[in-house]
Image (spheres, rainbow, N blue to C red):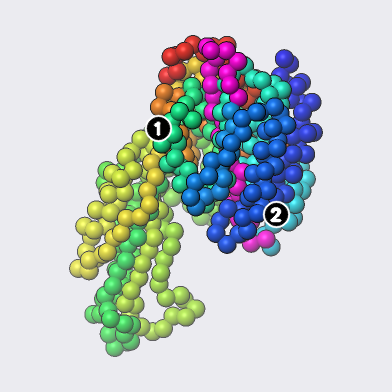
Amino acid sequence: MDTAAKVDALMDGLRADLERLAAIPSVAFPGFPAEPVRQAHDLLVGMLRDVGVERVERIDLPDTAPVIFAEIPPPSPDAPTILLYSHYDVQPPGDEKLWLSPPFEPTPVEGGLRARGIADDKSNVIAHLGMLRAYEGRPPVGVKIVFEGQEEYGSPFDDYPPSDPERFACDAMVIADLGNLRPGTPTLTTGLRGASEVVVEVRTLQEPRHSGEFGGAAPDALLVLLNALSTLHDVHGDVAVAGLRREEWTGTTYTEDEFRDLAGVRDGVPLIGSGSLGERLWSGPAITVIGLDAPSVEHAASAVVPYARAKLNLRFHPRQDAKEAQNLLVEHLRGLRPFGVPLTVTPGDTGPGYEASTGGPAYRAALTALREAWGEDASYVATGGSIPLVNGLARAAPGAEVLLFGAQDSMCNLHAPNERVLFSELRNTVVAMCAFVREYAADFRPGAAA
């Protein structure tokens, strides 16, 4: 099969199906209608059946949208089985005034399309389908397909696969919920930072007291909290909590100009931290204050503040234990007594990171496939975000190689206004998927996975 020519012949149909799927506002957050999520589910089931997939099932778990599970048996007893994952739900559109076109009306942009969820993750759903179409529903490997319907909000499905390991058993899996470092740069993601949340609060007075009469001696809860938060970073902006793991990053990363543009850093404002961007973003910790309860400036009174609270988000090294990382932050805060005032520290949700093994037959096949699709060797990156399901699938199939690549790119505005996908990235991802299954089937030997 001339892979590139076959995929090029399919692109008009894949684009049309991507537009159909992206036009469905499949937001699975509370407060949004459930019908569009079901509509997206049903559309994908139909697409799978149209390509010849006979076994298509629905996994229904409490308090989550339906998960599509489909399976194509391996063509021979010694052929490998791969699992393909992506999700069909999307983020809410946010402030629609910030969009250049209605978020659920797929709109042409230079080289691609704009719509909410068109990159994250509907482009990758279509990439999986594109591979199946290129092989007319009969690829040279067994295939298990998981299309999740509530990934963006969080789902009990994250922890479900280990309870049903036979269903998810495979030799390799492609988690397509991300993409390239930049357009045109083939990228394998090899690590995911873990995530944890911690709430810290301060109560000092029964109620506010006049700042003129009591300020200077009455303990200001907001001042106490700010003092505590200031200990989390050193003078350079590096995390100062002892024991949180940080290592040199040896893979590819952004240039500083790229990162400043992606993050929207204002002119003249420096980046925080020291060392490479890779260390700061991927192989080291980050602590962000994501919420603060305190009197607003607009409604401020001349009074000593009696109560203040902050919510912290911790990201930590892919190989650091999640509970260990959270406990290090909790104990750091509990050990403080700003101006002699104790803090109340409450640990919240936590999720582990993940670091993939490399060097097995699936990784060799992926490197060959990405080079074939993009015309250059793949770069290795990590991501500061977490994909909790990766750990669930890895526990269900502990011997499987885990590959993370897809049709998104770092500049696609995922979770932001004016999200877009480029046809070049979608086309090349389909080519890479086709080449991957071909190379993996040719190189695979039972028991050879790393």
Query: Where does the N terminus fall, quadrant-wise?
Result: top right
Q: Would you call the spot at circle 2 few (<14 residues within 10 Å), some (14-19), or many (20 or more)?
A: many
Residue 71 x %, y %: 58, 28
Q: Decide if residue 211 is on the left or right side of residue 431.
A: left
Judge from the rendering whether residue 394 lies leftward or rightward of residue 175; answer left or right: left
Q: Are marks 1 and 2 in contact (CB under 8 Å)?
A: no
Residue 108: quadrant of the picture: top right
* Residue linked to disc 1: 395
In percent of width and height, residue 87 lies at 58, 41
Please name the residue shown 40% across and 27% down the image: 398
Looking at the rendering, the stretch of residues picked out in magenta corresponds to 72-96
Task: Name the spot of residue 266 as percent of width and height, x first.
Answer: 56, 55
- Against 386, is 3 above or below? above
Q: Residue at x 34, y 53 (%)?
A: 233
Question: Which badge, 1 or 2, is on the more N-terminal residue?
Answer: 2
Q: Nearer the viewer, residue 269 or 249?
A: 249
73 falls in the magenta region: yes
The correct choice, above or below, for 214 with respect to 312 in the image is below
Taking the spot 31% from the left edge, 85% from the top edge, the residue there is: 209
Viewer-proximal residue among 153 and 416: 153
Horizontal and vertical percent position of residue 309: 36, 67
The majority secondary structure of the magenta stretch comes to loop
For the C terminus, which image quadrant?
top left
The CA distance from mark 1 to mark 2 is 36 Å
